[in-house]
Image (cartoon, rainbow, N blue to C red):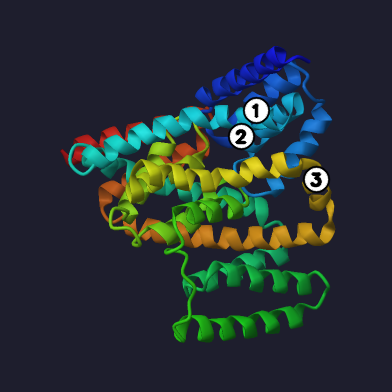
Amino acid sequence: MNKQQSKTDLFAIFKTFLRFGFLAWGGPVAQIAMIKDELVDREKWISPDKFKRTLAVYQALPGPEAHELCVYFGMIKAGRWGGFLAGLGFMLPGLLLMLLLSYFYAAYGATTLLPLFAGIAPAVCALIVRAAHRISTHILHDKSMIYAGIISIILTLFSLHFLLVFLICGIFRSLWIKNQKAVAAIVSLALAVLFLLVFRYAGLQFSGSKSGLFIEGLKAGMLSFGGAYTAIPFLQNSMVGNYDSITTSSFLDGIALANVIPAPLVIFGTYLGFLAGGFSGALLITAGIFLPAFSFTLVGHKQIERLIENKTFHGSLDSVSAAVVGMLIITALQIFLHTITTPIQTIIFTIALAGFYFLKHRLSTPAIMICCGVFGYFVSA
């Protein structure tokens, strides 16, 4: 293949996935279905069985699965440059739209758009509650996972650092599946008490808020097991209250914006970075969030595939997933208590929640967000 042909192929790959990016409405399920329909069912890039195995790998890993699939398809077609350009093309429309919306929000949101977001906030709360329920029913599939999730909920309520929560849940589940259930309970309780005393009440609690926007994005990208919604607890914990421009309300506004544009939900991190540090902050946190999604495939998909099939490693991922679900449930509860404080907000929340459960169209989420925003705007006007 000559250089001109290679450049043509790379440009064609970029255009293909850029088009996917402009059509990326409806969340990961719709995005993955779109990619499968064109590249597997019609273009025959890989077989359906190979697609299922590949998707299973990325579903076990953190990060937006649809974006990771794009990187994978680009790589098998044109190597690492193809993978990079495919991933870039898929995320670029959402990134540019979110940068634009973030600019207008920062410039006009506090005055012009405030009534609109007053109606959207309860809908975002409903969306997070729905996501917490959906993800928990998918991940907490046996007693050990359910109990690990409960442990995570309790420890998160006590504000124990997430790494220690992961550790305790991992130890608990590893002992439980070895049928040492009493030992699992005793050891987990002892570790929880020890860590709470040492790291919380002795004033030695870790803090991720000082480590920079890139690191906060990387943390969210590396730990979002179970879908993009599981990045919410990490970004909320590290961003809300640690930057003057980011409150719980503005945090929810970012999630709302991410749901009305064609993009992976985790792109709301770009908005948070913009509020915290302008355009450079937005790009830094975005780079951190998407770096794992690029790296998993570009560094070595086959090695990761073998690693995922390792039962010990898979068990560790399950423990982390259960812990993340517990954190997401607490985040959903905290956001609910902060957001739903009036009868009108309760009505909007209830209607939106019903819509998220029963409406399945790929554009139903942005439609619900917009309708709730318009309703809230006129009610509060």
Of all residues, the one furthest to the front in this rendering is 3
SS for dot 2: helix
Instruction: Return the residue at label 3.
Output: 305
Residue 35 place in picture, x, y as percent: 65, 25
Closest to the observer: 243 or 31? 243
The type of residue carrying mark 2 is Val
Q: Are marks 2 and 1 in contact (CB under 8 Å)?
A: yes
Disc number for residue 33: 1
Instruction: Return the residue at label 2.
Output: 29
Where is residue 30, by image quadrant? top right
Residue under the point 35% across and 62% down: 242
Residue 116 place in picture, x, y as percent: 26, 38
Residue under the point 34% across and 51% down: 276
Real-space CA distance between mark 3 and mark 2, rounded to the nearest whole angstrom: 21 Å
The type of residue carrying mark 3 is Glu
Residue 45 place in picture, x, y as percent: 77, 22
Closest to the observer: 37 or 339? 37
Of all residues, the one furthest to the left in this rendering is 381
Residue under the point 74% across and 24% down: 77
Closer to the observer: label 3 or label 2?
3
Residue under the point 55% across and 67% down: 162
Reading the chain from its start, which is encountered first: label 3 or label 2?
2
Where is residue 175, by image quadrant? bottom right
Q: Is residue 371 above or below residue 135?
A: above
Q: Are marks 3 and 2 in contact (CB under 8 Å)?
A: no
SS for dot 3: helix
Closer to the observer: label 3 or label 1?
3
The type of residue carrying mark 1 is Ala
